[in-house]
Amino acid sequence: MSRCKEGRASTAAATTYVVGVDVGSIMLRCHVYDKTAEVRGVSSKKVETLHPHLGWVELDPEVLWTQVTDVIKEAVQAAGLQMNQIAGLGISTQRGTFITWNKKTGKPFHNFISWKDQRAAELVNSWNRGLILKAIHVISTILHFLTRSDRYLTASSLTFTTQHVSLRLSWILQNITEVQQAANENNCCFGTIDTWLLYKLTKGSVYATDYSNASSTGIFEPFQMCWSSVLSKLFSIPMSIYPPVEDTNHSFGSVDAEIFGVPIPIVALVADQQAAMFGQCCFHAGDVKLTMGTGIFWDVNTGNHLHTPGAGLYPVVGWKIGKEVVFLAEGNASDAGSTIKWAKELDLFTSVDETSTMARSVIDSEGVCFVPSFSGLQVPVNDPYACASFMGLKPSTTRNHLIRAMLESIAFRNKQLYDTIVKQMRVPLRNIRADGGVSNNSFVMQMTSDLINKKIDKPVNTDMSCLGAAFLAGLALGFWTDKEQLKKLRRTEIVFEPKRDSGEYTLAMDNWIKAVQRSLNWYSQTSY
């Protein structure tokens, strides 16, 4: 679909604009921005996922490529502009979704393996329980005692998850002979979505990624800011397959003129959560971003301090711009918008907009609990074999009770993640800013504010990954001068403030936690 902003669309050709593209897990969006950060044109498409086997989640690279070029063309057209009016392009992408391809021919060896893919669950479980990891923990603990280095402290609590690229890539190398052979012959390219799109947009002339995307793979060494030779050796991944890592806003090259008719500079690559953080103008240590899209992501700006992981929080590079390196501490839950999408497909409601009203139409969920675990449970539970479930169903249960239980589950996961952050963070928390499609749900937002007893600021534009990519691109181009100018361009729509004491939710949350416990370890390892 596409939409244009009326009024100022027919400006002089000399006026330039910045484009932000976001390849999310559910939707692919392109926004065209003017200098006031007003959205002048929009286009979006549903990201098509494939499920060839139980637990496998893939994307067709050629379909995705076509969708990306289409949304850029449509958004520019919707804005009433010509391609030569686009000053530059910033690209935000879902993280941890990767592909490998033939270096000589550019042909993919397989589909994109999504960050939600569970095929490596048994491999992850085996490594986490194995003697090698135990030995790493012991040796790193000793080295930390002797050196007091945070690098060894981090290694002393190292664990793997299916969301990390590392073991999913290892699985590919073990199970697809063609990939292993190409890697041995130095004829294999590895890349997350940003790298693949850059490669395609430049017709194979540029092969690179940025620090935010690289640091989100689980095979990047954030202390040394490079690909991890230790983990690569551990998983038998050749270092030769990794792309060069560049600054987040960097002159990556230009879109080949044959694609859009004119060359367009590509000046920013950024991972989606980091893009949303930048779009929210969370530039100071202690600033917090809550994104509720397909999943839930809580990110805290830790400045130039790298957070030592523990109990599920992990450090990532927020962005690198010249000498400035900003780190984030992050915790996530895989299912938020995905559960609402599932409920809609079951016809539990007609429009997403009505879910808040449905939830408020009943006093409570009547004891019904929903466990949002289509992709396992992450922080602080960390069980890839947990199942999604409704519990406490009764003959009197209505659709409204079911919807309320589902929305409550998102707020409860927010509470769990927030409590984890509070326990672990060394920096005092400042502003909390929310974005993502689920942030438009007033029931979830108000209940989350009540549970954590904090104000939550929601902006006018909740597609913050697009804006963050555009902001980064605009800074690189001189389209905007500095971060202070960007702060003035961000606009708040509503601030949710606590209205009920968090203690009023104690019984409901205790029941929900009981339901979570009964959903754990539901699937056997061989189910995947």
Image (cartoon, rainbow, N blue to C red):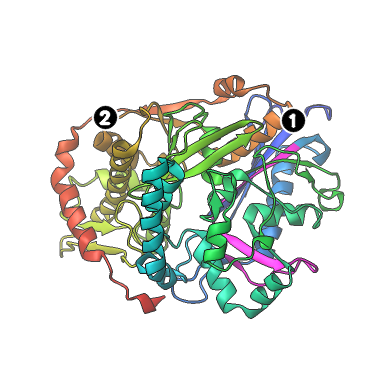
- Disc 1 marks a residue whose amino acid type is Leu
Magenta stretch: includes residue 103: yes
Query: Dot 1 corresponds to which residue?
Result: 477
Task: Determine whether, in the image, residue 239 is placed left or right of residue 429.
Answer: right
The answer to which of 125 and 111 lies nearer the viewer is 125
Circle 1/circle 2 CB separation < 8 Å: no
**Percent x, y for residue 133?**
40, 63
The answer to which of 477 and 355 lies nearer the viewer is 477
Depth check, mark 1 against mark 2: the one in front is 1
**Which region of the structure is painted magenta?**
88-113
Q: Secondary structure at mark 2?
A: loop
Residue extending farthest to the left is 507
Magenta stretch: includes residue 106: yes
Q: Residue at x 80, y 48 (%)?
A: 255
How far apart in space, not on screen, are marks 1 and 2 (Cα)? 41 Å
Q: Is residue 382 visible?
A: yes
Task: Determine whether, in the image, residue 342 is placed left or right of residue 321.
Answer: left
Q: Residue at x 65, y 61 (%)?
A: 239
Quadrant of the image for the C terminus?
bottom left
Q: Is residue 37 above or below residue 157?
A: above
- Disc 2 marks a residue whose amino acid type is Pro
Q: Which mark is residue 498?
A: 2
Q: Is residue 214 above or below residue 459?
A: below
Q: Secondary structure at mark 1?
A: helix
Q: Residue at x 22, y 57 (%)?
A: 369
Q: Is the residue marked by circle 1 packed among few (<14), some (14-19), or many (20+) residues within 10 Å?
A: many
Task: Determine whether, in the image, residue 123 is placed left or right of residue 190.
Answer: left
Task: Determine whether, in the image, residue 362 is placed left or right of residue 239.
Answer: left
Q: Which mark is residue 199?
A: none
The answer to which of 397 and 287 lies nearer the viewer is 287
Q: Residue at x 58, y 37 (%)?
A: 319
